[in-house]
Amino acid sequence: LKRFKFLEELERYTKLNYRVAFPLDLKQSGAHYRLSAVIIHLGAGPNQGHYIAVVRTAAHWLLFDDEHVHKMEESQLSSIFGSPYESSS
């Protein structure tokens, strides 16, 4: 998902911070899809910040942050992206 929008009145890009809800499992047209990874931008804008990745393994989720790898619970996934106070469908 593109998380930056150009604002003509400011003549610059701004980061969209609203939470995007998505299922971890999706059944559609007889097919079953499972979310396997999420890439997350941490930072205030498109010209600064840091990217991390969260990847599903057979047993759990792993958070990759440069040379650091941490095991995390699926219930923690939604706490690390988007603003909890805004949402978008």
Image (cartoon, rainbow, N blue to C red):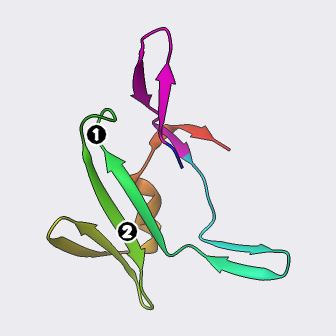
The residue segment tinted magenta is: 3-19
Q: Secondary structure at mark 2?
A: strand
- At label 1, which amino acid type do we have? Gly
Give me the residue at 30% from left, 70% from top. 63
Q: Is residue 40 above or below residue 28?
A: above
- At label 2, which amino acid type do we have? Val
Give me the residue at 63% from left, 65% from top. 23
Q: Is residue 19 above or below residue 30?
A: above
Give me the residue at 24% from left, 37% from top. 48
Q: Which residue is mark 1?
A: 43
Of callouts 1 and 2, which one flags the residue occurring earlier in the amino acid sequence?
A: 1
Residue 45: x %, y % from top left? 32, 32
Residue 89: x %, y % from top left? 68, 44
Q: Which is more toward the observer, 10 or 36?
A: 10
What is the crowding at mark 2: few (fewer than 14 residues within 10 Å), some, or many (at least 20)? many
For residue 54, the mark is: 2
Q: Is residue 40 above or below residue 29?
A: above
Quadrant position of residue 59: bottom left
Residue 50: x %, y % from top left? 24, 49
